[in-house]
Amino acid sequence: MNDKFETHEHDVLIIGAGGAGLRAAIEALGHGASVGIVCKSLLGKAHTVMAEGGIAAAMANVDAADDWRTHFGDTMRGGKFLNNWRMAQIHAQEAPDRVRELEQWGALFDRTDDGRILQRAFGGHSFKRLCHVGDRTGLEMIRTLQDRGVQMGIDVYMECTITRLLSDAGRISGAFGYWRENGRFVVFKAKSIVLATGGIGKAWPITSNSWEYTGDGMALAYEAGAELMDMEFVQFHPTGMVWPPGVQGLLVTEAVRGEGGILRNKNGERFMERYDPKRMELSTRDVVARAIYTEVKEGRGTEHGGAFLDISHKPAEYVKRKLPSMYHQFLELADVDITKGPMEVGPTCHYMMGGVRVEAETAASTLPGLFAAGEVAAGLHGANRLGGNSLSDLLVFGRRAGVAAAEYAKKQSVASVDSAQIDAAEREALAPFERSTNENPYMLHADLQQTMQSLVGIFRIEQDLQSALGKIAALKERAQRLSISGSRMFNPGWHLCADLKSMLTVSEAVTLCALARKESRGAHSRLDFPKFDPIWGKQNNIISRRGGEMSLQQRPTPEMPQELQKLVDGEKGAGA
């Protein structure tokens, strides 16, 4: 063992301290494992706190007719049937219990008159299904899980970036990283690892995602030999703030539409009538995002290139009670009182449906000892995620990943950590200090974001995607020449070098998959192939690393059992 670095040892190491990571930690601890949780920023700062609308679970508190079967059907239809059906089934069946558990652990929810958890309507859901706390649901969820985890005694390593997973004889043995504050290296020995690192939004310039979202988990898994899946499906949330520039991309929750908000173009037309006359503003996210994009492209957009979202027809007190965060966000950041006038909104890169390919029951990746849950994992949401399903996803699969990682660790002896892998990780991390090439990480990041925004954005065509692949290849070359000055203490330029490696990996994977899928489905829109293709409807794109190169192959989606097929077929007319 390489003893020149600070070393920590755990049965289960969890990378990421959002909803999925905390829920996995709580479960693994409950199964008697020693658990360490590593996060890139501070505990409680996880991106889950930005989830505003609610937790989707068929609790039938408001609509008595709701049950898991309808939730399952909605999820499959929303995902355009590319979902892993077993994940969608487990998710729909287990979500209500996970919400009740949160409540037992002290989470406060808005209530019905008779004291049950209140549920609200959301795009793509057949019933009022989102359990919520005003529009601050994610914050309450993190608070509750964190209190529970801290009380149970999790070890938390904050402001620590993991740059490489370590393996031994084809299974996970630990991770290598550094403390962001002082730049010192740290080695974690672990029998199993759960990735819960979230999404990839920072590869685009206009995003609702916070700075941590650089695709680290997916890149770490890929480098270690695990498979990624469905990377072309990047969700652009229809409503982010478009003005002022400092808050561009900041999310305007779908709850605004759930509570009766109306979308209009600059001519005052309620344009959703043209795109989905039945569901209007509560259509699925891909449809609403495309509608706003089309209105702007055809010259009917607002001054700053968006649309108007208006809830000022509702009583001011109602708006302040139901949407407190939105009211304050617009007042403080944009000087707009949403009870008196409209918000200006537009599509923003929001959520990644693709990610690490995992088994439904255990959240296990294709690499033994490596598990993944939440946004970093693929499968549940198929081609497009429904609002609110992400929070129940974190709870359901965070718990399952925690159980499976703890069970796996019990059966393993301590894996040896290979000092050659650690030396290589150290050399790679320090390389930018040793070069004098003047290749600036900030410039490279800006160029990558521009490439993704203009060529791999909300609408795609072959020529753009080919061009993007060429540009990403050139950016990867430039990344080999990144150089930074200063010391390892508090050096944001150095942190960005590590993040860029991840972002370049996931950007290439997204582009390759988008180029291969010659159809439009869910969040993936090809202007040159605008229709569904039944053959592509039964295939997942799988990315793996072969001989140092990124390789892409197709694999058929798993066959759905007859009784579940009936649930989906029976309602196809209703929601398809």
Image: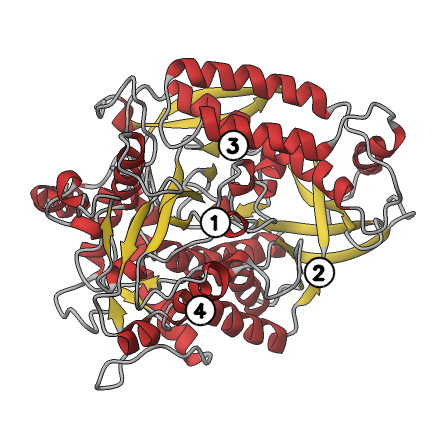
Question: Is residue 331 positioned above or below 221 on the image?
Answer: below
The Cα–Cα distance between marks 1 and 2, rounded to whole angstroms, is 23 Å
* Crowdedness near tag 3: few (<14), some (14–19) or many (≥20) residues, C-alpha within 10 Å: many
Q: Secondary structure at mark 4?
A: helix
Residue 419 visible in the shown view: yes
The Cα–Cα distance between marks 3 and 1, rounded to whole angstroms, is 26 Å
Q: Quadrant of the N terminus?
A: top right
In terms of sequence position, does the residue under pointer 1 or pointer 2 come before the other?
Answer: 2
Q: Secondary structure at mark 1?
A: loop
Instruction: Kindly report which numbered mark, 3 or 1, lies closer to the viewer in this rendering.
Output: 1
Q: Look at 53% across and 58% down and name the residue there.
A: 402
**CB under 8 Å between callouts 4 and 2?**
no
**CB under 8 Å between callouts 3 and 2?**
no
In terms of sequence position, does the residue under pointer 4 or pointer 3 come before the other?
Answer: 3
Q: Amino acid at mark 1?
A: Ser
Disc number for residue 227: 3
Q: How is the image coloured?
A: secondary structure
Residue that extends furthest to the bottom in the rendered view of this protein: 114
Residue 539 location in percent, x, y? 32, 26
Disc number for residue 208: 1
Disc number for residue 158: 2
Q: Amino acid at mark 2?
A: Met
Instruction: Kindly report which numbered mark, 4 or 2, lies closer to the viewer in this rendering.
Output: 4
In terms of sequence position, does the residue under pointer 3 or pointer 1 come before the other?
Answer: 1
Residue 505 visible in the shown view: no
Q: Is residue 179 left or right of residue 327?
A: right
Q: Look at 55% across and 67% down and name the residue there.
A: 26
Q: Amino acid at mark 3?
A: Glu
Residue 334 location in percent, x, y? 46, 58
**Residue that carries the numbered disc 4 in the rendered image:** 328
